Amino acid sequence: MTGWRIDDLEALAVVLGHILAHDGKAPRGELEELLKEKMVAWKVPLNVERFIRQGYLQEDEKGIIYLDWRTRAEITSKDLLGALMRSKEPNPSINVESEGSNEPEGSPQASVSAE
């Protein structure tokens, strides 16, 4: 994956996560719509074709996308899904207090307030 742009890596992670969460397959149109929410529309078909050409995905004659050999060889699906799930969890170390907080001025918890 040397030379990949960070947004292309993000697109691959999103596609792989979506496919893994949907029993290992997804319609191409569904994947493209998902990616259009994450990146500029003109790059979406280029990225999907690139992922197919490089062996991360395969497409059948009905337009269904599956994981291909390179994904199985390079990526541990359990680790990818775990990382994607952790990225959606709220950060428990950030304590947001309301403006009417009872915390004294200058305390760490009082310094972060909801606007």
Image (cartoon, helix red, strand yellow):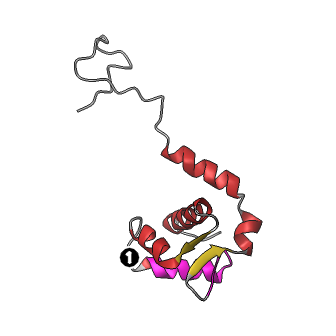
Considering depth in this image, is 70 or 26 the residue closer to the camera? Answer: 26
Q: Residue at x 58, y 79 (%)?
A: 64
* Residue 98 against residue 91 in the figure, above or below: above
Q: Quadrant of residue 59?
A: bottom right
Residue 57, position as x, y percentages in the image: 64, 76
Q: Residue at x 55, y 83 (%)?
A: 63
* Residue 24 against residue 57 in the figure, above or below: above
Residue 34 falls left or right of residue 81? left
Question: Which residue is most to the bottom?
Answer: 61
Q: Amino acid under label 1?
A: Ala
Give yes or no for residue 51 being in the magenta stretch: yes
Residue holding disc 1: 41
Mark 1 Cα-neighbour bin, 10 Å: few <14, some 14–19, many ≥20: few
Q: Which residues are magenta?
A: 44-60
Residue 81 falls left or right of residue 14? right
Question: Which residue is most to the right?
Answer: 73
Element type at marker 1? loop
Q: Residue at x 51, y 67 (%)?
A: 11
Residue 21, position as x, y percentages in the image: 58, 59
Give yes or no for residue 8 being in the magenta stretch: no
Quadrant into which the N terminus falls: bottom right
Residue 57 falls left or right of residue 115? right
Quadrant into which the C terminus falls: top left
* Residue 14 against residue 49 in the figure, above or below: above
